[in-house]
Image (cartoon, helix red, strand yellow):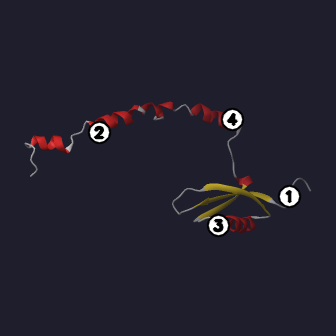
Amino acid sequence: MGNESFYQEFEVFSRRTKTSPFQHQFSLLAPNEDIAIVMAQENFMRREPVADIWVVKRDNIRGLNQEERQMVERLDNKDYRLTKGYGYLRKKWRQYEQGMFDEKEILSWAGGQKK
């Protein structure tokens, strides 16, 4: 008979609104997809607001293999895209805002009188 089990592993994803992204919530064991969706609804939807649920058989989810992970690491050298080098901008912006004209200075241009 082999190592096959009556139960299959499923991963449950949900989103709170129709426009929010899906997030992984939990794993569950069920004999088939129909029972898995019922179990996900019973265990999750009654606790939190949910707009949609996905139940995916774990065997249908593919991750990166070792070679593909190494490729991603090589491609991940994108330090030039990070904004941590622009930390001084907040200070510069504050200085700029402090140097902007205030009401008193603007009124002084018109001889100090409001019209």
Q: Find disc 3 in the rendering and name its residue.
A: 45
Q: Find disc 2 in the rendering and name its residue.
A: 97
Q: Find disc 1 in the rendering and name its residue.
A: 5
The answer to whether the residue labelled 2 contacts the one labelled 4, judged by CB atoms less than 8 Å apart, is: no
Residue 110 vs 33, above or below: the answer is above
Give me the C-alpha separation between circle 4 and circle 1: 31 Å
Describe residue 29's horizontal placement relative to residue 103 as left or right. right
Give me the C-alpha separation between circle 1 and circle 2: 67 Å
Residue at image coords 66%, 56%: 25
Helix, strand or loop at disc 1? loop
| Image location (x, y in percent) of residue 2 | 90, 53
Helix, strand or loop at disc 2? helix
The answer to whether the residue labelled 1 contacts the one labelled 3, judged by CB atoms less than 8 Å apart, is: no
The answer to whether the residue labelled 1 contacts the one labelled 2, judged by CB atoms less than 8 Å apart, is: no
Q: What residue type is labelled 2?
A: Glu
Residue 55 vs 111, above or below: the answer is below
Give me the C-alpha separation between circle 2 and circle 4: 51 Å
Residue 103 vs 86, above or below: the answer is below
Number of dots carrying numbers: 4
